[in-house]
Amino acid sequence: MNYLIKNAAIVNEGSVNHGDVLIKNGRIEQIAPAIQTGFAVTEIDATGKHLLPGVIDDQVHFREPGLTHKATIYTEAKAAVAGGVTSFMEMPNTQPPAFTHELLEDKYAIASKTSLANYSFFMGTSNDNLEEVLKTNNKKKDVCGVKIFMGSSTGNLLVDNTLVLDNIFGGVEILIATHCEDEEIIKANLANLKAEKAVLEPADHPVIRDEENCFSSSFKAIQFAKKHGSRLHILHISTARELQLFTNMIPLEEKRITAEVCVHHLHFTADDYSSLGNKIKCNPAIKAPFNREALWPALLDDRLDIIATDHAPHTWEEKNEPYEKAHAGLPLVQHSLPLMLYYVKQGKLTLEKMVEKMSHAVAKCFQIKERGFIREGYYADLVLVDMDKGSTVKKENILYKCGWSPLEGFTFPASVTNTFVNGHMVYGNNMFDESYTGMRMKFDR
């Protein structure tokens, strides 16, 4: 089906311009102040609404295969498109972990049948799968990146062998994404706190997983990257101290070391453990308020390059265990764009800057082919938002399989009305068209 979106406020590449966008055969055919067509189209009157490029989330955990009691690619991709996320990149800590290209392709096969959004999957690393990891050098256009858990993961996903790390950074030719926490510092902090307290609580989480733990690991990753000239992307920056490791002195396209910030670290602080407890337990931890206050200016001045979610759902039962047993992670992919629109309304950032950090910069950072911008010839991954239509997060409208959100009860001042994936309207007016599945993303490398 072809669409003509009329009278939209088009937010793209640093400006807002009113006009029409013609979608033909899955791509953006024309952008102009007023468009007339000589063929049949479905017209959508976007008067009073803003048209954005679809959000690209570079860090999600959709739990399939193996952990589907928490989530599936189908359920979380559906939640994503309802929130304006048209493409996602998913992490390797499923069961079994994506340690081989055969296992990686199994995930692509599932997504090709069930995902409403476009997709890519990270290759996983361990202390003993270097040969498989290096095969990504022959698949540069087909795989978003290689993921290293340099701390704080389960099973054999933790890569703590210095020689292996050196070989990965020295051998991998595509983007390396790292979870940076220092396992030794975490263990020492935990032991010290247990010597003082009989029972630990959620508010202890940022004490155990402190600022020093994050800085130490990020610094180590950067040393490896600088040694080898690697393309390093550090995920979910959560501390003020780490910001000194990043620069805004060169264009994003020329950076070899980039950084991501997640919506929960921009929104919550350690003060929220008293009311939300384990609901906001995540790794790296949500920390003292001065960290959040430092992240915002670093985002605005481009030391932090992109905004993502680290969407990580767990069942309600798993989150309601005592602190030490409670699983770490928050479900966020349905609500990241509405939450950032809230901050636009609050004057924290402009619509143009938000679009840059959630769409344009992600496409640049990962060299995604023909997505992330409203440009003629690009795939029509588009989102219509109503900046004056509020929506409240309630159990009834949460689409995550886990059925809960740390934002429950929060009212957003704006909402997503329509989401297009490759020119197909998969979400509109609270309804889904599930006759379509998204595409595997390709990369210009």
Image: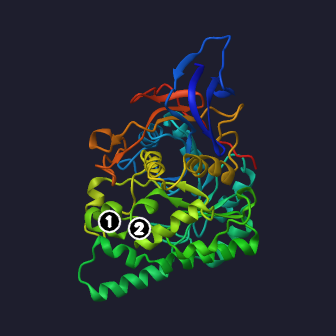
Q: Nearer the viewer, residue 107 or 319?
A: 319
* In contact (CB < 8 Å): disc 1 and disc 2: yes
Q: Quadrant of residue 154?
A: bottom left
Which numbered tag is attached to residue 286?
2
Label 1 crowd bin: few (<14), some (14–19), many (20+), radius 10 Å: some
Disc 1 designates what residue? 272
Vertical placement of residue 405 versus 203, above or below: above
Query: How far across and how far down the image is residue 441, in percent?
Result: 64, 42
Q: Nearer the viewer, residue 16 or 365?
A: 16
Q: Nearer the viewer, residue 140 or 161?
A: 140
Query: How far across and how far down the image is residue 252, in percent?
Result: 70, 58
Distance of mark 1 from mark 2, alpha carbons? 9 Å
Vertical placement of residue 281 versus 192, above or below: above
* Sooner in the amino-acid sequence: mark 1 or mark 2: 1
Label 2 crowd bin: few (<14), some (14–19), many (20+), radius 10 Å: many
The residue drawn where x is 28% and y is 54% is 316
Which numbered tag is attached to residue 426?
none
Q: Can residue 40 be seen in this view?
A: yes
The quadrant of the picture occupied by the N terminus is: top right
The residue drawn where x is 50% and y is 67% is 156
Query: How far across and how far down the image is residue 54, in percent?
Result: 56, 40
Q: What residue type is labelled 2?
A: Ile
Mark 1 vs mark 2, foreground winner is: 1
Query: How far across and how far down the image is residue 179, in percent?
Result: 54, 66
Q: What element carries label 1?
A: helix
Q: What residue type is labelled 1?
A: Asp
Q: Can residue 157 be seen in this view?
A: no
